Amino acid sequence: MSLTGTVAVPTHLLHTKVSADVEVEGPIVISDLGKLSTFVKALPKESMVNLYQPKGTPLRVLSGNVDLSLPYPKHVLSHKKVKTAMAHVEDSERANWKDWGGTPLDCFAKLHTSDLMQVQTLEKIVGKNHAITTHFSEEDKTWSITAGEKGTANMSVTVDLEDCAKDGGPDICSSRFGGWLPSVLSCLPSGMVELYTAHKFALILRHTEKEHLLVIMDKQS
């Protein structure tokens, strides 16, 4: 009785599950996630949405008197690496998120997604093509996100952390991401998330109230 969605691409892994009334089990293939997202966001709050897709046919999304149809794609690119990625998730869950793919996750903390709102302004002010660096500091109990290059405009957003802990590694753990980081972080639903990371390594954000996991790949590792 749930709807599970997973995307595994070179920059990130997104896995989420929501409650649903399932009449017929099976996969749903979305050819244009942007159009579906825009459609759902335009509906009145608490609207009921029905998804209908017999195998190999267009996806129909119905809500009240509104009906959206999306064609069935020839290639499902986001699904190619899902099996491998989810195997890593299962291994990390069994290890209580102490490591990812065999690499120890030295840094742990909790934060509220509302503190990440200002991250969305980074690309508007600095630009979309600049690298983004993050710094995790156990001493200051902060996580900072900085965009920009030397000799250009730079902007940082600093987030206060709760239950901040660190087990080994340098005093400040840094990771480097592409300009797509703000849009990926916007995938997080509102609420508290657990943050796991290590020096020059992936960033893992795990929601504490919903089954929602975001793993963002560091460009250096």
Image (cartoon, rainbow, N blue to C red):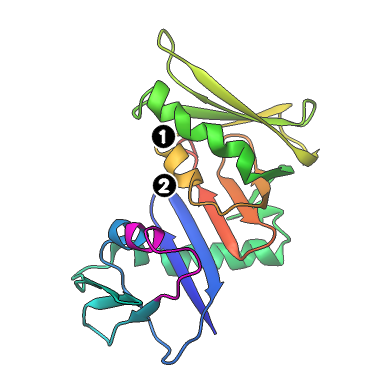
Q: Residue furthest top?
A: 151
Which of the two labelled residues, at mark 2 and mark 1, occupies the earlier sequence position?
2
Q: Nearer the viewer, residue 151 or 199?
A: 151
x and y, in percent, of residue 77 in the image: 29, 62
- The Cα atoms of the two marked residues, 2 and 1, are separated by 9 Å
Please name the residue shown 54% across and 51% down the image.
188
Element at badge 2?
loop
Whether label 2 touches label 1, CB < 8 Å = yes
Query: How many residues crowd mark 1 within 10 Å: few (<14), some (14–19), many (20+)?
Result: some
Asked if residue 48 is among those painted magenta in the image, a careful observer would answer: yes
Q: Nearer the viewer, residue 203 or 38?
A: 38
Position of 89 relative to 112 (above/below):
below
Q: Is residue 208 above or below residue 132?
A: below
The amino acid beneath tag 2 is: Thr
Q: Where does label 2 land, which residue?
A: 11
Dominant secondary structure of the residues highlighted in magenta in the image: loop
43 vs 97, nearest the viewer:
43
| Residue 75 drawn at (x, y percent) | 22, 68
Q: Residue at x 45, y 46 (%)?
A: 184
Element marked by disc 1: loop
Q: Which residues are magenta?
A: 38-49
Disc ID at residue 178: 1
What residue is rendered at 65% in x and 52% in y?
A: 191
Which three-letter amino acid code belongs to the residue tagged 1?
Answer: Gly
